[in-house]
């Protein structure tokens, strides 16, 4: 069973590529960002508590994110998943590994999509114009999100590097070029 972590800074194209990979490999796609935004839009208690973190460009607390993923996996256990935006901290990665062991599974690979910061900012600002998302419309918030990613999330790569499950692809180019690079890495891990 494939369990792929798609990894990279905000704006690197994880969401777009995760959807394509999920269709290509017949996997479930879980985007913690979309789950959280859905909770905010629905006005749930979880959504209200998360809204303040997102508006500042900060990460959601580990306990809430892990519980959301656990709930999702409990109802989607018949095939593998592609995880977009999870795990975001080393603590989440460690808990996630244990969750997978409980169901006799493991992470197949973590693939990092490498994109330079100025390109990330440009992409997110463009996305903000199209989506109307407040957290995508402020360069200051975007740069804070990238900095938070570097400080708290980028180090998760070390966790999977130690397990020899880490790979990196160039995230620049056409969507098809990046998709082909991702598939080459995933196919080599199967």
Image: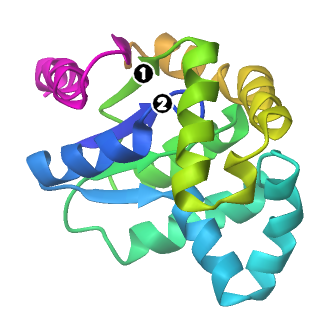
Q: Residue at x 65, y 44 (%)?
A: 92
Which residue is at 29% across, 67% downward?
Answer: 77
Please tell me in which quadrant of the rendered image residue 118 appears: top right
Residue 176 painted magenta: yes
Position of the C terminus, as image quadrant, is top left
Q: Residues within 10 Å of mark 2 (few under 14, many from 20)?
A: many
- The answer to whether residue 61 shows anywhere in this view is yes
Task: Check if residue 112 falls in the magenta segment.
Answer: no
- Residue at the spot of label 1: 113
Circle 2 SS class:
strand
Q: Is residue 62 above or below residue 147?
A: below
Residue 124 spot, x, y in % from top left: 59, 38
Q: CA distance from mark 1 to mark 2?
A: 6 Å
Where does label 2 land, which residue? 7
Q: Is residue 60 left or right of residue 53?
A: left
Estimate the x, y position of residue 140 in percent, counting from the top left. Answer: 85, 33
Contact between marks 1 and 2 (CB within 8 A): the answer is: yes
Q: Mark 1 vs mark 2: which is more N-terminal?
A: 2
Which image quadrant is residue 119 in? top right
Residue 143 position (above or below residue 72): above
Q: Is residue 157 left or right of residue 153?
A: left
Q: Which residues are magenta?
A: 167-190
Q: Which residue is nearer to you in this view: 127 or 12?
A: 127
Classify residue 52 as left or right of residue 38: right
Q: Which mark is residue 76?
A: none
Mark 1, other Cα within 10 Å: few <14 / some 14–19 / many ≥20: many
């Amino acid at each position: 069973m494939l369990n792929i972590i798609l990894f990279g800074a905000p704006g690197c194209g994880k969401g777009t590529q995760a959807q394509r990979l999920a269709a290509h490999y017949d996997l479930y796609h879980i985007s913690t960002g979309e789950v959280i935004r859905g909770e905010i839009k629905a006005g749930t208690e979880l959504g209200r508590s998360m809204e303040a973190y997102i508006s500042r460009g900060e990460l959601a607390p580990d306990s809430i994110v892990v519980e959301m993923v656990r709930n999702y996996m409990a109802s989607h256990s018949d095939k593998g998943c592609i995880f977009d935006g999870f795990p975001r901290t080393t603590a989440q990665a460690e808990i996630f590994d244990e969750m997978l062991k409980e169901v006799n599974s493991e992470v197949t690979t973590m693939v990092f999509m490498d994109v330079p910061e100025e390109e990330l900012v440009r992409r997110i600002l463009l996305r903000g114009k199209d989506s109307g998302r407040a957290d995508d419309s402020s360069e200051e918030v975007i740069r804070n999100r990238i900095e938070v990613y570097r400080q708290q999330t980028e180090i998760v790569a070390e966790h999977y590097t130690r397990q020899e499950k880490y790979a990196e692809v160039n995230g620049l180019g056409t969507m098809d070029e990046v998709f082909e690079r991702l598939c080459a890495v995933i196919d080599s891990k199967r």
